[in-house]
């Protein structure tokens, strides 16, 4: 049976409900008469002392954010909200997030997303207390990669108490959490399997802004687990788009990790959902290379981490080890770490030396912006890849390997230097109270 996505007329945010006994949130949606239920569980959470109105506002925002996974299946022209309408400011935020968060999805499906998503709103006053100082308690979301581990180390050096947290509870992330050694929270999220059936039947499918959905989950978790600061680990490279359409629309795989999203989401939550709640990246002023340089010093984590996204795909086969060594993310992380580690050390991490494999050349050409667009992955800027490769060309330990030799004469790499890209800026949203602790450390 074929799913007729063009016949779908409306997407409905049907309802949401929370079972306090099971600490389980149900999010219900409809594409015309096709229903979906997504579940999110908060093991160990508690309602004791929780502001129930704030919790309901958080659930409402998450319901609206998580709907993007189901809305994209058909992109119907009408959106209905059967619970309660968002404020105009929240509706504008959602339209921005859906539009830019689905930019890559639209490109790969050969459709236009600009101006297609319209959220109804109600011009009502949102009854929340005035915003004040940030709430106590820090959590660092773990994704299994190097970035969040650098954030953990920075907080530890500043003697800041924190917990780690994840959504999904993968085996790899649990191992990384044990290596960090802090109290760890694990939230469970289950998509409706009917969505995967529709994908097999011809529904639109592709990348969604998962970080935006997880941001909504973090706000709900803050109330149920008692934390008020979500310390993300997104670098400034997330602001760099993959390419620009003729209309001027920037297609950015990492939009929901960008400073723009972080600012818009953080301000909305502080203003309309949980005053004093802070959502910010500790690494916003860092380049990917600056993070890689710092992580190279953290040898205790080198056998634990993995940035390969194939470890976390829902339905696809996963690599036998921590690294598939055949995707843009693996190639970039190898390249970013190479200027700061020996060949033997990096080969031990990945299981092989990617610079000794000529089949990797085409993938590295894309990372270097040579005849191809920046890959749709969370990788660094083209300038960073060029600077890292240029450093390897100048390094006697690395410049004899086939991949490095291939790029030795590339004119685009002339003048590329690591040093300017290792500088850390102050263009971030780190609260001043935490800034003082970090500076003192």
Image (cartoon, rainbow, N blue to C red):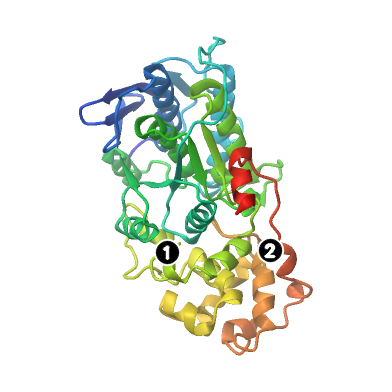
Q: Is 23 situated left or right of 403 in this image?
A: left
Residue 327 in the image: x percent, y percent? Answer: 47, 66
Q: Which residue is drawn at 56% across and 59% down?
A: 379
> Mark 2 falls on what kind of element?
helix
User: Above or below — where is 408 with respect to 255?
Assistant: below
Residue 413 in the image: x percent, y percent? Answer: 73, 74
Residue placed furthest toward the left: 21
Residue 59 image-quadrant placement = top left
Q: Is 121 situated left or right of 373 in this image?
A: left
Residue 286 in the image: x percent, y percent? Answer: 64, 55
The number of discs equals 2
Depth check, front residue: 328 or 437: 437
Mark 2 vs mark 1: which is more N-terminal? 1
Image quarter of the N terminus = top left
Residue 193 in the image: x percent, y percent? Answer: 27, 41
Q: Mark 1 points at which residue?
A: 306
Q: Mark 2 points at which residue?
A: 422
> Mark 1 falls on what kind of element?
loop
Image quarter of the C terminus = bottom right
Q: Is 13 situated left or right of 377 in this image?
A: left
Choose mark 2 or mark 1, whichever is in front. 2
Within 10 Å of disc 1 (Cα), the crowding (few <14, some 14-19, many 20+) is: many
Q: Do the CB atoms of the residues marked 2 and 1 lie less than 8 Å apart?
A: no
Residue 110 appears in the rendering:
yes
């Amino acid at each position: 049976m074929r799913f007729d996505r063009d016949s779908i007329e409306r997407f409905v945010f049907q309802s949401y409900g929370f079972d306090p006994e099971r600490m389980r949130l149900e999010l219900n949606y409809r594409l015309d008469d096709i229903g979906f239920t997504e579940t999110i569980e908060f093991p160990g959470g508690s309602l004791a002392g929780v502001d129930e109105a704030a919790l309901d506002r958080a659930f409402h925002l998450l319901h609206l954010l998580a709907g993007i996974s189901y809305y994209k299946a058909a992109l119907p022209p009408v959106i209905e909200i059967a619970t309660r309408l968002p404020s105009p400011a929240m509706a504008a935020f959602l339209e921005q997030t859906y539009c830019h968060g689905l930019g890559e999805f639209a490109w790969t499906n050969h459709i236009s997303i600009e101006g297609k998503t319209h959220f109804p709103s109600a011009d009502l006053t949102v009854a929340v207390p005035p915003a004040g100082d940030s709430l106590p308690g820090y959590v660092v979301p773990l994704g299994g990669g190097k970035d969040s581990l650098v954030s953990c180390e920075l907080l530890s050096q500043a003697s800041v108490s924190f917990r780690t947290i994840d959504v999904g509870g993968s085996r790899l992330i649990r191992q990384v959490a044990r290596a960090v050694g802090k109290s760890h929270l694990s939230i469970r999220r289950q998509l409706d399997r009917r969505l995967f059936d529709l994908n097999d039947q011809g529904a639109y499918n592709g990348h969604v802004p998962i970080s935006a959905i997880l941001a909504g989950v973090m706000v709900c978790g803050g109330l149920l687990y008692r934390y008020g600061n979500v310390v993300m680990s997104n670098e400034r490279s997330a602001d760099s788009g993959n390419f620009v359409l003729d209309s001027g629309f920037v297609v950015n795989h990492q939009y929901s990790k960008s400073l723009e999203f972080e600012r818009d989401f953080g301000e909305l939550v502080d203003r309309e959902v949980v005053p004093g709640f802070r959502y910010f990246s500790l690494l916003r002023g860092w380049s990917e290379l600056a993070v890689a340089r710092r992580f190279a010093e953290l040898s205790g984590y080198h056998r634990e981490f993995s940035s390969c996204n194939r470890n976390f795909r829902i339905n696809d086969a996963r690599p036998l080890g921590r690294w598939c060594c055949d995707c843009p993310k693996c190639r970039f992380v190898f390249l970013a770490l190479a200027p700061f580690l020996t060949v033997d050390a990096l080969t031990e991490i990945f299981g092989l030396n990617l610079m000794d494999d000529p089949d990797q050349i085409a993938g590295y050409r894309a990372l270097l912006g040579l005849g191809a667009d920046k890959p749709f992955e969370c990788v660094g800027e083209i300038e960073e890849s060029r600077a890292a490769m240029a450093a390897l060309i100048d390094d006697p330990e690395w410049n004899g390997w086939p991949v490095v030799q291939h790029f030795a004469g590339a004119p685009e790499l002339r003048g590329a230097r690591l040093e300017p890209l290792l500088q850390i800026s102050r263009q971030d949203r780190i609260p001043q109270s935490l800034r003082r602790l970090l500076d003192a450390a």
